[in-house]
Image (cartoon, rainbow, N blue to C red):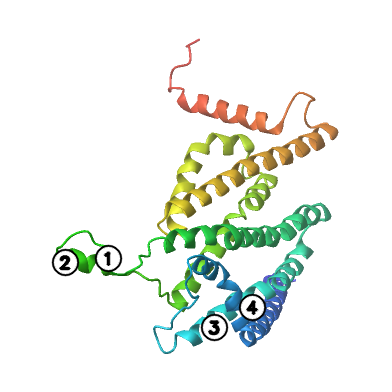
Amino acid sequence: MTKTDEIEDSSAPLIEHLAELRTRLIRSAIAFLIGMVLCFTVWNPIFNFLTRPICAGLNERGQDCGLILIKLQEGFFVAIQISLLGGFMLAFPFIAYQMWRFVAPGLYRSEKNAFLPFLISSPLMFFSGAAFAFYVVTPLAFDFFLGFQQVGGDGIATSDDPDAQALANAGITFQGSVQEYLSLTVKFIVAFGMCFQLPVLLTLMGKAGLVSSRGLADVRKYAVVGILVLAALVTPPDVITQVILFVVVYGLYEISIQLVKRVEKKRDEQLRAEGILAEDESLDDMFAEFDEDEDDAATKKPGSEPKA
């Protein structure tokens, strides 16, 4: 066999994998387009559902629930935005299945059994975060924002100054844009849905040996700073939603540490059953001792050994 034949034989599996990937991507794109078209036909009921938090806050204040279109084309782009979000959510189980079918042939049976629970729990955690954002966070946030309205009218000012009287009579009423409201709501849903992926991600990394429960606990103070920065970036500038996001994500971080500990415990039990570890040993302790030995060796000065 010549070297050219060996190169062609080695490139054949790569071409087959690329063809399989193309097929999976095409099927996923078709499913997404079908979901998008279906959501576009019913975008009005979806929009009415998404406006429930703001309408509830306005009704409590005796105001009519109404949003306005600032631009002529704004209504069309709102329908497109709803269709994109809804189409992706409808097609996500099928897209995840296509991803699994592409990756599964290259995994051992034990790896399949380890990876499949994370594939199932990931969308469940995302929908849990989205539901928490929609039913808990957005009503609190919108109630906070609507509290800055001011009812105008006569007889409010106590000063004879005409300027003060004019200021007292000025009313501040919410007249929200449809697109701005939808963008804010979707931002809440996506942000909390992604943050709820933290236990899934860290547990999967712990199962792969990329992180440890001890390491996560040691960097807890840095994680707190990172979560605070995340809460400031993905939420509007109000204290309520930032505190809620911080408390939720930090709680998920602590839960992730316990899940990684559980993964490490099962791994140590398996290694003890195989005779690799002693009864009083753990893989994490062995790695810690190895890191300490490396640090000691690195801090030793050259020529510090005693001469014979």
Residue at the farthest top position = 308
SS at circle 4: helix
Residue on which disc 2 sits? 163
Count up the numbered dots.
Answer: 4
Q: Nearer the viewer, residue 73 or 104?
A: 73
Q: Nearer the viewer, residue 234 or 222?
A: 234
Residue at (77% x, 30% y) in the render: 277
The amino acid marked with disc number 4 is: Gly
Tell me residue 56's x, y (percent).
55, 67
Mark 1 or mark 4, earlier in chain: 4
Residue on which disc 4 sits? 87
Residue on which disc 1 sits? 155
Residue at (69% x, 62% y) in the render: 123
Q: Nearer the viewer, mark 4 or mark 2?
A: 2
Tell me residue 154's x, y (percent).
28, 69
Q: Residues within 10 Å of mark 3 (few under 14, many from 20)?
A: some
SS at circle 3: helix
Q: Nearer the viewer, mark 3 or mark 1?
A: 1
The amino acid marked with disc number 1 is: Gly
* Res. 8 in view: no
Circles 4, 2 touching at the beta carbon (< 8 Å)? no
Mark 4 or mark 3, earlier in chain: 3
Q: Nearer the viewer, residue 288 or 2?
A: 288
Residue on which disc 3 sits? 80
Residue at the farthest bottom position = 72
